[in-house]
Amino acid sequence: MNEKITLLIDNIEKVIVGKRETITQAVTALLTEGHILVEDVPGVGKTQLAAALARSVNGSFSRVQMTPDIMPSDITGFSMLDREKGGFEFRKGAAFCNFLLADEINRASPKSQSALLEIMEEHQVSADGETYILPRPFMVLATQNPVETYGTYHLPEAQMDRFIMKISMGYPTKAEELSILERNEYENPINKISPVLETDDITDLQEQVKKVTVADNVKDYILSIINATRNDEGIKLGVSPRGSIALYKTAKAWAFIKGREYITPQDVKDCCVCTLAHRLMLSPKGKSIYDTPENAIEQIMKRVIVPTE
């Protein structure tokens, strides 16, 4: 595994116990300059993951609670009259940071959701004819609770497509939870960790990931999986070209984390479910065949021929 990535993951594990794969997925998304949706029940460490990631790379961190009354300007910023200067001054919103935690994104109004998704895509804010570039790296970690849906605004599939990955924390094992209890006995472990990298290290790693090579037969394998989602009677909405780009990028980052300069079919497999499942919409027949989009991707991977050379 890449030495710097190992340092980063090990540091985050001082706070997030027993979730190395989830942490690795989050780091993978960061290396692709993408954003992640963390869908899980409350209290399993979603906020801690975002804060630990930011602190580990010495990045600025903001948290915005996506309540129904939040305004787009709370996220992007707004212009305010400066009486002394006799003009308007732009006040930056929560988005001007390296890591933005959008907590319970499905509770915000569609207008505020759209404002957030726009800055995710553009990495900039436009206001009053001016363009303000967000810091690099910039990553949104949005959370949503899949259980309690009262008073929520479901994210449309077109907006779900903007997240490069959807991941889940899951409950810890009994042994892991014992470790969590002991680590939190006197203070929050997030206060004990120090940066092991700088934000410049992350932008440098992001550029290195782009240089990872992909053989033609592996590209064909990626496209075969994508096309299989579009030609399955159990799937109403298949993966878009944005999804195929996402899988291409995440597989390259995954290979880089593993210490390789090329990707293998296994890298593609490892990234398929978390990169593609949230982009699917099952048909009524598909719900009885596959039950979940995640299972649909698993079954498709079993059917698509894996390149051997």
Image (cartoon, helix red, strand yellow):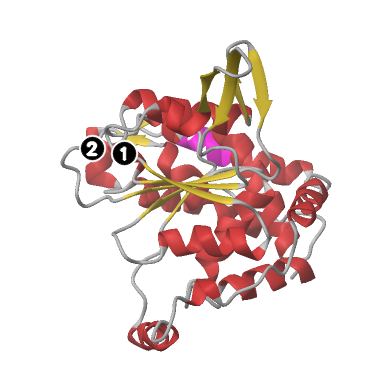
263 with respect to 13 (left or right): right
Answer whether residue 156 is visible to the viewer in this image: yes
Query: What is the x, y in percent for residue 154?
Result: 28, 34
Q: Residue at x 46, y 36 (%)?
A: 229
Q: In the rendered image, which quarter is residue 55 located in?
A: bottom right
Q: Amino acid at mark 2?
A: Thr
Answer whether residue 240 is visible to the viewer in this image: no
153 with respect to 265 (left or right): left
* Nearer to me, 28 or 177: 177
Q: Is residue 226 above or below residue 19?
A: above
Screen quadrant of the N terminus: bottom right
Q: Magenta residues?
A: 223-230
Magenta segment: does it hold 185? no
Q: Which mark is residue 296?
A: none
Q: Residue at x 44, y 53 (%)?
A: 298
Question: What residue occupies the far left of the structure in this picture?
Answer: 150
Q: Which residue is mark 1?
A: 106
Q: Which residue is mark 2?
A: 152
Q: Earlier in the sequence, mark 2 or mark 1?
A: 1
Look at the numbered discs 2 and 1 and tell me whether their residues touch, using CB distance below 8 Å.
Answer: yes
Q: Amino acid at mark 1?
A: Asn
Local SS, label 2: loop
The residue carrying pointer 2 sits among few (fewer than 14), some (14 to 19) or many (20 or more) residues within 10 Å by Cα, namely some
